């Protein structure tokens, strides 16, 4: 296992370099440039060329990329082309912790609701519990965050006055955005947990465990649940990386200063260093999450070995 982990970590380097190169090239292939306009007016040609010279955008692309890799190797993501006198490092340093807090809370809600709901639905198949859980899961998947978020604000902030409308910083401010993000995730987890557990409890080794007289709770927890969680863990890797690095819709609705908005606005602004920077941060979380998923496989199923 140790050699496998080291080998995967070493593979992170070419993977992240490839992602950086692809993002670096494709974002510059988008029509338009970061200095084409000042507000709604076209930028004067002389001013635009001066700014491009200042940020080395007049150089050949290969030279820009080599310069970027040199700075990246020293931990410098570069200067933002849209936010004056701010570096990408500053933007990530300020916004990532906020998005990470929101994402972690949402994942706790999703796991705390989704896995138990899926287990109860599978163990009570074709009963009221199963039908209710399935109906709620379908509703949770069907209602998007852009609908659930305003609905929560209207109900708990405007009508009942229990919670603040927006912003971030206190536990009360975190309740509604956490629910808006976590409910949809919990619904997906519940559906997958139910389907996977239903398949596992029909396997021959589960029938054998029951035939030996083992208590039903022990059969489910020790023999069925671990194998049933393997498909669930598979989706948790990308899901975790996505919510930890920011969700644009929820952050926009609740006025949360997270990193999600930078994924979208940096492209609209043609802010090349910020686009590459936030993409690279997301990629790091994604490859690390996938590694943790593979390690979890071996813990859930001892038959899985990584050589």
Image (cartoon, helix red, strand yellow):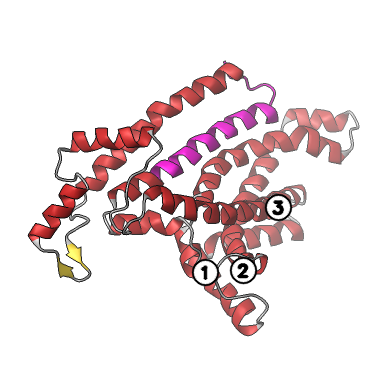
Q: Any mark on residue 112, and which?
A: 3
Question: Mark 2 or 3 closer to N-term?
Answer: 3
Q: Are marks 1 and 2 in contact (CB under 8 Å)?
A: yes
Under tag 1, what secondary structure? loop
Q: CA distance from mark 2 to mark 3?
A: 20 Å
Q: Nearer the viewer, mark 2 or mark 3?
A: 2
Range drawn in magenta: 279-307
Residue at point 33%, 59% (across, down) = 83
Under tag 3, what secondary structure? helix
Question: Residue 238: x and y, percent?
Answer: 51, 43
Question: Mark 1 or 2 closer to N-term?
Answer: 2
Q: Quadrant of residue 86?
A: bottom left
Which quadrant is the C terminus positioned in?
A: top right
158, 228: nearer the viewer: 158
Question: Residue 93: x and y, percent?
Answer: 48, 50
Rendered view: 283 above or below 38: above
Q: CA distance from mark 3 to mark 1?
A: 23 Å
Residue 237 part of the magenta-drawn span:
no
According to the picture, the residue beneath numbered tag 1 turns out to be 254
Which quadrant is the N terminus positioned in?
A: top right
Question: Mark 3 or 1 closer to N-term?
Answer: 3
Please state if 203 lies on the left or on the right of 89 as rendered: right
């Amino acid at each position: 296992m140790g050699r496998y982990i080291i080998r995967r970590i070493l593979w992170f380097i070419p993977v992240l370099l490839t992602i950086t190169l692809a993002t670096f090239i494709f974002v510059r292939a988008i029509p338009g440039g970061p200095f084409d306009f000042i507000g709604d007016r076209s930028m004067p040609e002389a001013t635009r060329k001066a700014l491009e010279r200042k940020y080395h955008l007049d150089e050949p692309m290969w030279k820009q990329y080599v310069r970027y890799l040199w700075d990246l190797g020293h931990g410098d993501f570069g200067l933002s082309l849209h936010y004056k006198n701010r570096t990408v490092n500053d933007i990530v340093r300020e916004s990532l912790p906020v998005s990470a807090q929101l994402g972690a809370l949402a994942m706790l809600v999703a796991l705390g609701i989704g896995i138990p709901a899926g287990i109860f639905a599978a163990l009570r198949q074709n009963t009221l519990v199963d039908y209710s859980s399935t109906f709620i899961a379908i509703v949770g998947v069907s209602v998007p965050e852009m609908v659930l978020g305003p609905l929560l604000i209207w109900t708990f902030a405007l009508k009942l006055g229990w919670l603040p409308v927006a912003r971030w910083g206190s536990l009360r401010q975190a309740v509604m955005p956490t629910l808006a993000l976590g409910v949809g995730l919990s619904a997906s987890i519940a559906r997958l947990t139910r389907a996977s557990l239903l398949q596992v409890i029909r396997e021959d080794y589960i029938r054998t465990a029951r035939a030996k007289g083992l208590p039903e709770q022990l059969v489910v927890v020790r023999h069925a649940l671990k194998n049933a969680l393997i498909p669930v863990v598979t989706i948790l890797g990308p899901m975790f990386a996505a919510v930890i690095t920011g969700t644009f819709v929820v952050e926009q609705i609740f006025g949360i200063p997270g990193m999600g908005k930078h994924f979208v606005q940096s492209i609209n602004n043609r802010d090349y260093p910020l686009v590459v920077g936030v993409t690279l941060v997301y990629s790091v979380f994604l490859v690390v999450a996938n590694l943790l998923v593979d390690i979890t496989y071996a813990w859930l199923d001892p038959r899985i070995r990584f050589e």
